[in-house]
Amino acid sequence: MRSLVCTVAFALAVVPAGAASAQTAGRKGDSDVARGRYLVKIGGCNDCHTPGYPESAGGVPEAEWLTGVPVGWQGPWGTTYAANLRIAMGSMTEAQWMASARKPLKPPMPWFALRDMTDADLRAIHRFVKSLGPAGKPAPPYVPPGGSVSTPVIVFPSPPPAPPSSQPKR
């Protein structure tokens, strides 16, 4: 154990000034990217934003993650599409992403999950997505209710009507 401590101390002593902080920053960046990868995986981001992810039980190569899906989610709000996050976030600064992540979005995006994440978690997701680089094409644009779409859609029914009042009429 003593030789390990001496070796580590010697290695730190011979690192040029400023290089240690650069190495530490690199490790922190790497850990942020790894944390972001983990959060994207467990947070279900790939379920909607990666083609074929649910159908393959997560078997899509990471190089294809988060490129958007041209299948619409249609309901009373209109038709929305899972964005290509690699393009959408590619031009965003960390601050822009964090502000955007906390704003309400149309269904079925569970925007409240992003809203409730810590700043560190959102930074890690941003760093991971940026590390993937741009790929794919932009998702189709939002279509208002009643608008025409040319892509496949998953239809969400309107909520059921409220049950009739069980109070007796007078």
Image (cartoon, helix red, strand yellow):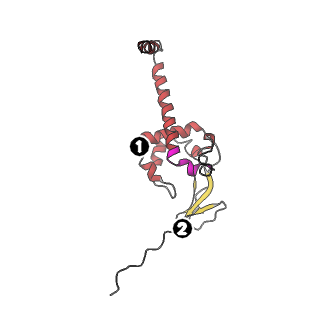
Circle count: 2
Question: Within 10 angstroms of label 1, few (less than 14), some, or many (20 or more) residues?
Answer: few
Residue at mark 2? 157
Residue 34 place in picture, x, y as percent: 51, 35
Res 132 quadrant in image:
top right
Residue 48 on the magenta segment? yes
In the rendered image, which residue does mark 1 sit on? 118
Q: Position of residue 125 (x, y in %)?
A: 50, 41
Outermost residue toward the left in this view: 170
Amino acid under disc 2: Pro
Give me the C-alpha separation between circle 2 and circle 1.
33 Å
As for residue 71 lying within the magenta part, the answer is no
Q: Is 73 left or right of 3, judged from the image as shown?
A: right
Q: Looking at the image, which is closer to me, 53 or 150?
A: 53
Q: Which mark is residue 102?
A: none
> Mark 2 falls on what kind of element?
loop
Q: Where does the image place residue 143, in percent across and percent down from the top left? A: 59, 61
Please report the bounds of the magenta region as a residue range: 41-52
Q: Residue furthest bottom?
A: 170
